[in-house]
Image (cartoon, rainbow, N blue to C red):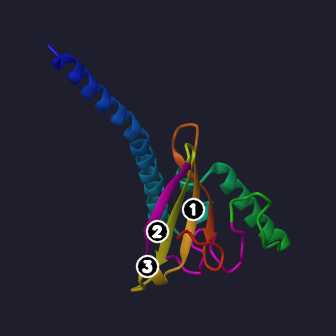
Amino acid sequence: MHRFPMVVRALAALVSTLLLIAPAVAEQSDAQRAESVVTAFYAWYSSTLSGLADDAIFRFVDKGVVSQMRAARKGLDESGLPELPEGCGMGGWEMDVDYFTKGQDYSERIKVIRSQVLAPRLATVLIAMINGNAAPNDAPQVVLLLAKQNNNEWKILGAVDTRNKISME
């Protein structure tokens, strides 16, 4: 006779627990999706020779950022200006350093150190650029900022070299 209220209470407790867990699970899957965009981007980027000139970059990087980088590259060739237009990505442009790898050479592989969803449509992914037999702790680290576009796909907005700049620990 009193079992029905106990079952209802147990069911209510289960539902409320699931409601509390659901946002964390959704955030985790968003973080994993952002990570997969970053790992797929670097796999593609390290295997292509055309990089920024290849329209396949739009699968991974925001179109506005790519357009501004291409315009800056074109301007660099014509006028010798070594910097991106204001507001393009993050981290700046150096003539002897690749924007996405923060080095002169492409890394053989990357290791995702941490990914975090900062807001429903904004995430960061911290990676180590591993060359040769270097340990991930000794490798240059890059933070990628990603935004979820209207089609719910994550796109890279910028890349920041963490050396002597920030700490995510």
Q: Return the residue at label 3.
A: 136
Foreground pick, 87 / 47: 87
Q: Which quadrant holds residue 3?
A: top left
| Crowd band around label 3 with a 10 angstrom C-alpha radius: few (<14), some (14–19), many (20+) | some
The secondary element bearing badge 1 is classed as strand
Q: In this view, does 1 lie above or below 66?
A: above
Q: Residue 101 carries which label?
A: none
Q: Is residue 79 above or below residue 67?
A: below
| Relative image position of residue 94 (x, y in whole percent) | 71, 76
Q: Return the residue at label 2.
A: 47
Instruction: Please indicate whether residue 67 sits to the left or right of residue 110 in the image.
Output: right
Q: How far apart are marks 2 and 3 (CA)?
A: 21 Å
The secondary element bearing badge 3 is classed as helix
Q: Which quadrant holds residue 2?
A: top left
What amino acid is found at the position of numbered circle 1 in the picture?
Answer: Leu
Q: Return the residue at label 1.
A: 144
Q: Which quadrant holds residue 92?
A: bottom right
Q: Which residue is situated farthest in the right direction here? A: 79
